[in-house]
């Protein structure tokens, strides 16, 4: 390991700056880790380095233009924010969308969840030095994005959702091709899940790391797979069914321990459930109208909820009767999940922080630049690359102790 | 828990202090004065199992600064919204952060964007606005963009 300094005395308090910018992911956050020796004793965060002003822009767009704007909040959850806004508007209007529209929304939502979870599995693998996992997960993410493009015309921004339904139809002639891709991805996800569950190094490396207890989950308002990994049974798709989820057969996955290992397992199990949902949607696609036509938006307020890949998304919409909202509040799931680092990181070793931070799948553009700041002006640089190397070295140490290769053994 | 049932119990417990209405079986909106906020929030945390802090919306309204706390209930479709309006020019609302740490960031954000003072917040520092940002509030309706550009040293028109 090429650590730039010798280990400091355990009592010496240092501050490790992580972030704020990283071009890989879309939400820049700056973290200051207070570190004593190798142990993290405090976490502080600074937000909104790229404040896009979406909420004020939303007050200057008509309801028809808004889903297009809101798709661009996030580079991965593009379906999330546009459908969540539509849920809010439909809650205000108290209308039900046509069945075909709800199935189309379900298909694009679950395709998004599959490619987002695969992206996370790959990144998590890279952070602990399992680069085979990284290569495999991202390889099988590509065909899922291709299916998304076949069905909607774009890999990310479908521009399909609109208030009262969807804008365009998706071509049924591609369903067979999509089914084939799903079968292939299903097999590979099963292989990855088995390999992860069987791997003794992964268990030693990730079990008991970054634990969130159910009490901490409730106190910090943690949502999505991060909460379900701690045994908190919450999923908006079941609790407040939108789109077609109420008609489909699927399960909410929970695991009891709340550590990084369980967060990985929950996501891998959810991938299987998402593929199950997609197959049912392709098989039972109803025909009929796509949307309710032009709707007049009355005065009032509505709240939309949506289970994004990272957890519950909330939009609060307030209308004054004109064709633009008076206020649109957007709360993405990472907003509460990242805040919970204060609970999950304190007491961890610094080599475990990378994977603990990554475990809630934050929109995580923060960790490129990190420097160890010392009071005496002697400033060794500790970059994000160094943190990843520290994390990978810890995996290698464990693997060599167990007499195994430091990577996943795929069957 | 059913929305109408909750509205009945809240009205029974707080009477005229809380104007509570169920818009549908899954949305409850309760308007109350800032001084009742903590008591009603504590009551809800005790009475409604699975209640968690979702997020808050702040709005510059005609009658003051509106702070709406959205509280989803795990395992049900219910979202309870507690609405308080703090009169201008010195809007003050008690902070929920000592009770639920989840409120910490959003309250700091609201303090930055509309200038509400959250009394009792353990970390009342800026979260969204940079340190160099002038002491004005971008989501207030009287926010003057030309003045803001002057303050930060940009020409009003470029």
Image (cartoon, coloured by chain):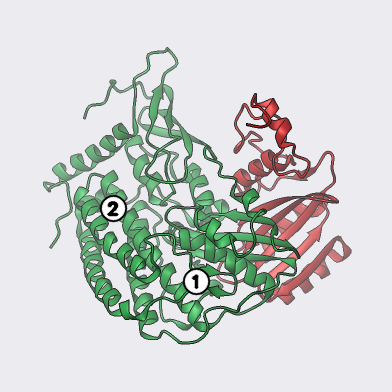
Chain colours: A green, B red
Q: Residue at x 59, y 69 (%)?
A: A87
Q: Residue at x 73, y 31 (%)?
A: B147
Which residue of the protein is positioned furthest toward the right in this rendering? B16
Chain letter of the residue beneath label 1 in the structure image: A
Which residue is denoted by mark 1 in the rendering? A237
Residues packed near mark 2 inside 10 Å, few (<14), some (14 to 19) or many (20 plus): many
Residue A260 appears in view: yes
> At 35% across and 47% down in the image, what residue appears?
A209
Residue A315 shown left or right of residue A272 in the figure: right
Rendering coords of residue A16 (x, y %): 42, 29
**Position of the N terminus of chain B by quadrant:** bottom right
Q: Position of residue A252 (x, y in %)?
A: 43, 71
Disc 1 crowd rating (10 Å Cα; few below 14, some 14-19, many 20+) is: some
Q: Is residue B51 left or right of residue A45?
A: right
**Which mark sits nearer the N-terminus, 2 or 1?**
2
Residue at numbered disc 2: A122
Give the residue drawn at x 65%, y 24%. Answer: B153
Secondary element under disc 2, as helix, strand or loop, is helix
- Residue A171 on image: x %, y %: 38, 77
**Taking A195 as reference, is A367 left or right?**
right
């Amino acid at each position: 390991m090429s650590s730039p300094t010798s280990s400091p005395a355990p009592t010496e308090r240092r501050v490790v700056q992580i972030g704020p910018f990283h071009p890989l992911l879309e939400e820049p956050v700056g973290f200051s880790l207070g570190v004593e020796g190798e142990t993290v004793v405090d976490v502080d965060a600074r937000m909104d380095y790229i404040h896009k002003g979406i909420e004020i822009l939303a007050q200057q767009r008509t309801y028809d233009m808004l889903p297009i704007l809101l798709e661009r909040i996030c580079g991965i959850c593009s379906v999330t924010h546009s459908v969540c806004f539509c849920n809010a508007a439909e809650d205000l209007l108290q209308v039900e969308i046509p069945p075909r529209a709800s199935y189309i929304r379900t298909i694009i939502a679950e395709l998004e969840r599959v490619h987002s979870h695969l992206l996370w599995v790959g990144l998590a693998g890279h952070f602990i030095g399992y680069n085979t996992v990284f290569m495999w997960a991202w390889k099988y993410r590509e065909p899922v994005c291709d299916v998304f493009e076949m069905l909607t015309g774009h890999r990310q921004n479908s521009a399909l959702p609109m208030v009262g339904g969807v804008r365009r139809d998706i071509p049924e002639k591609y369903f067979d091709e999509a089914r084939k891709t799903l079968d292939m991805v299903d097999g590979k996800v099963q292989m990855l899940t088995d390999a992860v569950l069987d791997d003794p190094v992964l268990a030693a490396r990730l079990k008991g790391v970054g634990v969130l207890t159910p009490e901490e989950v409730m106190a910090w308002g943690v949502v999505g797979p991060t909460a379900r990994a701690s045994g908190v049974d919450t999923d908006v798709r079941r609790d407040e069914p939108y789109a077609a989820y109420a008609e489909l057969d699927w399960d909410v996955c929970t695991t009891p321990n709340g550590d990084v290992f369980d967060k990985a397992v929950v996501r891998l199990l959810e991938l299987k459930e998402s593929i199950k949902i997609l197959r049912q949607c392709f098989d039972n696609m109803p025909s009929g109208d796509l949307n309710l036509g032009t709707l007049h938006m009355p005065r009032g307020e509505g709240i939309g909820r949506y289970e994004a890949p990272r957890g519950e998304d909330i939009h609060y919409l307030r209308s004054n009767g004109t064709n633009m909202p008076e206020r649109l509040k957007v709360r993405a799931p990472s907003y509460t999940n990242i805040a919970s680092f204060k609970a999950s990181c304190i007491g961890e070793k610094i080599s475990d922080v990378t994977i603990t931070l990554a475990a809630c799948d934050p929109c995580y553009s923060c960790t490129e630049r990190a420097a160890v700041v010392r009071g005496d002006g002697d400033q060794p640089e500790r970059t994000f690359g160094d943190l990843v190397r520290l994390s990978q070295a810890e995996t290698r140490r464990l693997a060599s102790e167990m007499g195994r290769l430091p990577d996943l053994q795929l069957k | 828990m059913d929305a109408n049932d909750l509205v009945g119990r809240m009205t029974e417990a707080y009477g005229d202090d809380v104007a509570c209405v169920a818009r549908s079986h899954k949305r409850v909106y309760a308007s109350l004065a800032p001084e009742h906020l903590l008591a009603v929030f504590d009551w809800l945390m005790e009475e409604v199992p699975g209640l968690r802090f979702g997020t808050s919306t702040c709005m510059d309204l005609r009658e003051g600064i509106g702070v709406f706390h959205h509280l989803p209930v795990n395992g049900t479709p219910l979202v309870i919204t507690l609405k308080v309006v703090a009169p201008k020019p010195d809007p003050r609302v008690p902070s929920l952060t000592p009770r639920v740490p989840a409120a910490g960031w959003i309250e700091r954000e609201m303090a930055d964007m509309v200038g509400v003072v959250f009394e009792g917040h353990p970390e009342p520092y800026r979260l969204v606005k940079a340190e160099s940002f002038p002491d004005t509030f971008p989501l207030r309706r009287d926010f003057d963009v030309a003045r803001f550009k002057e303050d930060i040293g940009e020409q009003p028109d470029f």
